[in-house]
Image (cartoon, coloured by chain):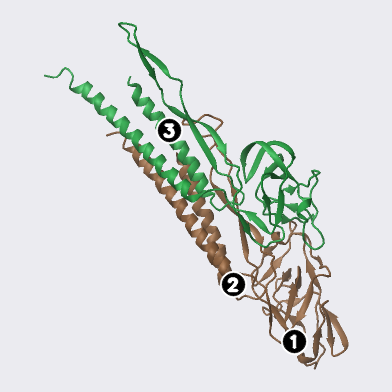
Amino acid sequence: MLEGLKAAATGMTAQQERMDALSNDIANVNTTGYKHERVAFGDLVSSSPGRGGVQTVRAGAGVAAVSAGRGTLQGSLRATDQPLDVAIEGDGYLQVKLPDGRTGLTRDGALRADSRGRLTTASGALLQPPVTLPQGMAAADLKINPDGTLFNGNAPIGRMTLVSVAAPSQLNDAGNGVYTTNAASGPPRVAGTGTQLHQGALEASNVDVADAMVDLMDAQRSFQMASQAVKTQDQMLSIANGLKQ
Amino acid sequence: MERGLYIAASGMLAEQVRQDLIAHDLANASTAGYKPDRVASKSFGDMLLSDTSSGRTVGPLGLGTQIDRQVTDLSSGPLRDTGEPLDFAVEGQGFFSVQSPKGVRYTRDGQFAASARGTLVTAAGDDVLGPNGAPIRIGADGKVTPTDIGVVTLNNARREGDNLFTGTAGGAAPSTVRVGTLEGSGVDPVTTMVDMISSLRAFEAGQRVITTIDSTLQKAANQVGGI
């Protein structure tokens, strides 16, 4: 009896986690390089039903929500005509050095030059390996090739390295659109030739608002159904309680 | 003592099991590749009543009920387009094979991902197996050809949790694998809610039977023989 109550409650918890992820997506609908979160559900191991059924009948224990990484769909490229804006097309990340010394990966290509001409992300993380613009160079003269090579007019001045990992769904989220690698994601490696940079553009968030809203409605209704199951289980307990007059 | 009390109680216990299964189904209304359960109840063996004074047969009497059989409804759920390169759905019958720590298991949940080793894995990190039983390598473009994924027919499918099934694998299933698609949950909200209500009412009816028999017994205990 109480198993059913708990199973129904796990349904509510799981849908709540899905709604949290969807709310986060909708909040980030205008965040550069944002990839929507994915939540996967798995049914929980079944238990034996007690006295009302034979032992081969197994009642489930509900559901658990687990993070399934992020969607990989390409966000649309938005032209900004800023020479220091780059958008990544295909699978890959810019490698940056976080203030605490860790190496991070990001798809947010809104770059700027610091006081010493080094290229950083909007949050101030330096590109890794570092790229420095020559002193006195006008930003308008900067040209970035699809393979990441930087030119001052016609003179090459450095190269941005694009990296990818074997298992992007396992990356740790370090906030600010930056991810860090771990053993499960595999180390960063140079991205394939299919990955290209576009200068003067930014990658928009890949959240599809219509999809997110439909998912949100679905999550809400599923939440309601699970709560009805909780209510029914409660009613049954109350009926059982009424046996003794 | 009163047999009716125990018969009604067995009905209430069976409805509890039915409710537990319904709650599990409703909790999994969004689980990819989930297959709902159908249960069948069976009555205990009938007992032949006879009149003790004359020995004449009165007739059979049922002794209650019990949930006896559980059938997982393996029909295909609705397919949903996600556009993700590592989402797969089986169109038609058949299961994906997965190398779990406990051995080869089967699933209809095709929400896969890449592992650090470059193989196709489930959300739990278990390798998905190809038609030859070997893990599937992900191509340099981050994609997997749908025909590289093995789909087998499964007999005696039995739920094991985490969207996995055990069973006896038959040969390759004549199904197609679709990429960028997930199979939704097979739970039908309307049918399940109706089942939930009817089961609740059956449970309530069982309680009424017990309280009625109880008040009869009370009369027998307190009023028979009274002046």
Up the image or down, A27 lies above or below B192; here it is below
For disc 1, the neighbor class at 10 Å (few under 14, some 14 to 19, many from 20) is some
The residue labelled by disc 1 is A83
Q: Is residue A91 left or right of residue B109?
A: right
Front residue of this view, candidates A95 and B8: B8
Q: Amino acid at mark 3?
A: Leu
Chain corresponding to green in the figure: B
Residue pictured at 81% horizontal, 86% vertical: A143
* Mark sitting on residue A28: 2
In the rendered image, the quadrant that contains the C terminus of chain B is top left
Residue pictured at 19% horizontal, 23% vertical: B222
Chain corresponding to brown in the figure: A
Q: Amino acid at mark 2?
A: Asn
Q: Give the image location of residue A116, x and y in percent.
A: 77, 87
The residue labelled by disc 3 is B13
> Are both tags, 2 and 1, on one chain?
yes
Q: Give the image location of residue A242, x and y in percent.
A: 31, 37
Q: CA distance from mark 3 to mark 2?
A: 49 Å
